[in-house]
Image (cartoon, rainbow, N blue to C red):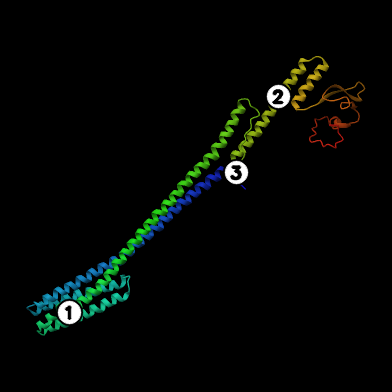
Amino acid sequence: MKTIRDMKTSTVMIAGFAAIIVLMLAISVLAWLQTNKLAQQNELLYQHPFQVRKALGDFETRINAIHRDMRGLMLADTEQELEDFVNTMDVNQAEAFRQLDILEQRYLGPKGDIQIMRQEFVKWNSIRQHTIRLLRQGKLEEASDRTKPNGVGGAQDKLLFAKTKLVYNFEINKAEQFYEDVTVLKKQLNTRLLVLNIVAFLLSVLLAYLLVKLINHPLEVITRVVDDFRSGNKSARSSYRSGNQFGKLSDSFNEMAEALESDYQIASSATELSDIMLNENDAHRFCDELLKKLLEVTNSQMGAVYLLNSDRTLFERFSCIGMNSEGCRPFSAIHPEGEFGRVLSSQTIVHIPDVPADSRFDF
């Protein structure tokens, strides 16, 4: 299974930053949605409880104005004054009906509450109109009794204001409910934004930690190995293994170091061999020293030098290290036989690894 260590650094960075961007978008979308909900709650609060409260206030103002004009009507001296009061009351009555229309549209409670208010208001107006007719007929005392608190008009006043109070109380409770909903939405928004910001912060810290680990650690390992190699330790190799770019860089350095070390060893061995060849004049000593060095360079345990005889028919042993007489017997120069057959026929170096135990070769 591919781990984060084996992923490309660019892939980790892109994935990390993409996750952070997604979180930022989530925070923005959440804030936008919650803000819209808050705006909707404010809109509901304005369009309904506020408008209802405003309409109720205007309705009560019109009722009180009609009350005032009814008292003025009792004191009117002339027919013209009476007509002026009646006209003013008609205007206030029409405006009160308009406010009832607004209440029917904006009121969030049972629609029957507003219908009952309208019915009681119609009854109140009917009683008022009858009182005005009594005044026109000169029955001032009877008309005045009707407007008193214990009169039919006064009783209707109390009933109408009681119905108005019922609507008012409902809207007050509704406004408080809207306020509580807004408060809850605000707390939810703050909590969610806090959680998302914490997650984004932790993800950023984790991404920074992973990037530092993915970049600094391999760089430290490779830099340390390069310094060792440059200081003369030709066998220094990077131990960092990964499928990312730093792993490939580590493998490339190891391959380069392997090639350089091999070249260095070959050059050193060639120099030493050249020194041996130049320093020895005796053939046997020359071959013995040459064999020793070759065994050291090739990490071998045995070796021999063969020379072609004067008849050019056999290769005969001239010098030998680590082998008995049976193991280094002469072999034909005419017929390519034995372990050296392929070498003699191809005249190239041959390496035979992993020789099995049942091989026909001696070693």
Q: How many C-alpha atoms fall within 10 Å of the one at disc 2: few (<14), some, or many (≥20)?
A: few
> Which mark is on residue 153?
1
According to the picture, the residue beneath numbered tag 3 turns out to be: 6
- Which mark lies nearer to you, 2 or 3? 3
Q: Is residue 246 visible?
A: yes
The amino acid sitting under disc 1 is Gly
In this rendering, the label closer to the viewer, 2 or 1: 1
Above/below status of 160 relative to 294: below
Q: Which residue is mark 2?
A: 267
Left or right: residue 283 compared with residue 137? right
Q: Amino acid at mark 2?
A: Ala
Sequence-wise first label, 2 or 1: 1
Q: Which mark is first along the chain, 3 or 2?
A: 3
Q: Quadrant of residue 342?
A: top right
Q: Residues within 10 Å of mark 3 (few under 14, many from 20)?
A: some
- Foreground: 131 or 81? 131
Left or right: where does residue 261 sit relative to residue 329?
left
Disc 1 is placed on an element classified as helix
